Amino acid sequence: MSEQALAPVSSGNSPKFSGGPATSGASKTRSSKWIANQRKLAPWLFLAPGVVMFLVYVIAPIGQSLWISLYEWDGIGVKTFIGIANYIELIDDEAFYTALYNNVLWLVLYMLAVPAGLLIAIFLNQTVTGIRIYKSLFFFPFVISQIVVGLIFSWFYAPNFGLFTKLLEFMGVEGIAILADERFVTYGIIVAGLWPQIAYCMILYLTGLNNVSPDQIEAARLDGAKGWKMLWYVIIPQLRPATFIAVVVTIIGALRSFDLVSIMTSGGPYGSSRVLSYYMYEQALSEYGFRMGYGASIAVVLFAIMMVFITLFIVRMLKDEREGY
Amino acid sequence: MFPTPVANASAPTRVAYKVALPISLVVWLLPLIGVMVTSIRPGSDLAMGNYFGVPSSFELGNYLTVFQNTPMGLFIMNSFKVTIPTVIGAVALSCLTGYALATYKFKTNLWLFFMFVAGNFVPFQILMVPVRDLTLKMGLYDTVTGLVLFHVAFQTGFCTLFMRNFIKALPSELIEAARVEGVSELRIFWFVVLPLMRPAIAALSVLIFTFIWNDFFWATVLVQGTHAMPVTGGIISLNGQWVAQWHLVSAGSVVAAMPPVIMFFLMQKHFIAGLTLGATKG
């Protein structure tokens, strides 16, 4: 129905055509029929390759994982249906709670990237010579792979000679082997993760600041707004779109954390720095397991957590779509 | 402009800002600078405890060692073999899907769009077991092709979100006018819309290049041996061999990071335009 709506709109826009010669009327209806059909068919032709690929590789696997989580399976042999036994096992699995707790820690602490990115963006939002180079160099950590970031920070934290250890010693604190200490390891990895994430938020805010309306700032200035007040009441409200995206990508980044844990500690010491994504991988694919079913059940939990945020995001997008178009 | 331009501030503030800039940059990049210096340090420096001083000699030999004694060259090649086809595939598919979702009205339009958006955000682990299984069954496990197919499919989600919003912002009069003229849908796409999409294609290409180059998870899940391993997975195995040989680890890291860095500096404008899409829209 709605696809036909396009046709009258376009012909309605060009009244001069309605008075066309009557002789060509027959061929016109045929061609407009073809156009109407073409318009019905065309979107599906354009969509088909992408949608098929996406269904096969993304949507279907979600369902399959839900299904596999009800089985005991080593990845090669026979699948044995065990109902919700995998989930029941999770309830008593201490390693699962450690990973879940660490995920919450990641989520909460990762959020620091948003205000930190805003602060750096404000610091760099100037027009002095060479500022563009500064901006791109500040953004640098986001461009390099998390694997390299992990290696860089492993070196940074290395006991005895790492730069961080030296800095601590310089300040008179006994050196701590961050990545070998159960108390600090997750914080250490999160700091490494914050480094590129802050850079990402910074670039979002730099773009946002660039588009803040100068009139409003001038008006607020005339009203005597300055500094923090200006930031809080005038600037931040205008940065809402940037903040929204920064929060979304930070949540996703926090829940996706895998690379850093993998390269910096492999979940250790004694599994204390595992997150759900890493624990799932360990159970399903590493030398510890090939427990596909159990791994899948961990993935389902992670998926459920992510789904909360995805739903919020979609709801907001739906609202925007309804208002915007 | 916020904050107040320093140009309007007092002289001391201006000087302070100019001093603070380089200092803060050095602090911000300190771990990176450390690694870069280490990568040109001779191994003997580290043995003697010279971790932070001036390197006793400027040693490009570490880089030579990395390429001569390890399959680093092959890893880099593999990364290109995975990354370039993925960029082409995902951008091409999303030009089509983005166009369809932006210009046609049909009942399921918004739901298909949300499917792409939501799928783009799911955790990789929920896909891991079935995708690995599927790749095994297709006989593509441990091949570059298997990795590319998955990447193309997954990145199509993000790319569709991007393309659809980009095309939606184009003036619709152009398409309407072409339709009135009786131009076929395919020709409208090819001759009217596609030329206007060039900036979006450029932005997406650099972004996807970086994302895929830096991917590590799927490289470990879908590839096992050296012959198809991209550089991110490769450097992890090298890291295991080079225990405490930080000059080599550093040189390897710098090499692995180089292509996306070069890409970023060459295409900076497009990269940032892509990344910040939507950050300004009300």
Image (tube, coloured by chain):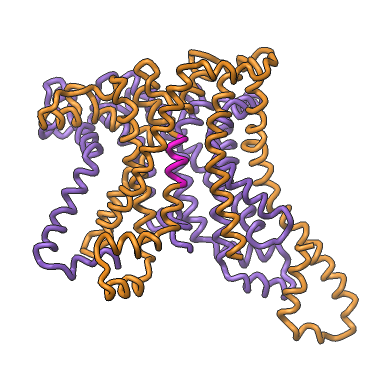
Q: Is residue B110 above or below residue B282?
A: above
State whether the magenta stretch is mostly helix, strand or loop: helix
Say which quadrant the N terminus of chain A sits in.
bottom right
Residue A324, x across and y down, in percent: 58, 64
How many marks overall? 0
- Residue A33 in the figure: left or right of residue B105: right
Say which quadrant the C terminus of chain A sits in.
bottom right
Chain letter for the part of the structure drawn in purple: B
Residue A236, x across and y down, in percent: 36, 59
Question: Which residue is found at the position 48% from the left and 62% from the top?
Answer: B281
Quadrant of the image occupied by residue A151: top left
Question: Which residue is found at the position 45% from the left and 50% from the top?
Answer: B206
Between A317 and B95, the one lying in front of the other is A317
- The colour one sees for chain A in the rendered image is orange
Question: Which residue is found at the position 15% from the left and 32% from the top?
Answer: A167
Residue A82, x across and y down, in percent: 67, 15
Q: Is residue B91 magenta?
A: no
Between A49 and B273, the one lying in front of the other is B273
- The part of the chain drawn in magenta is A248-256
Q: Is residue B241 above or below residue B258?
A: above
- Residue B205 in the figure: left or right of residue A182: right
Between B251 and A170, the one lying in front of the other is A170
Residue A228, x across and y down, in percent: 26, 59
Between B251 and B13, the one lying in front of the other is B13
Question: Which residue is found at the position 11% from the left and 32% from the top?
Answer: A171
Residue A79 in view, yes or no: no
Q: Is residue B70 above or below residue A25?
A: above
Residue B205 in view, yes or no: yes
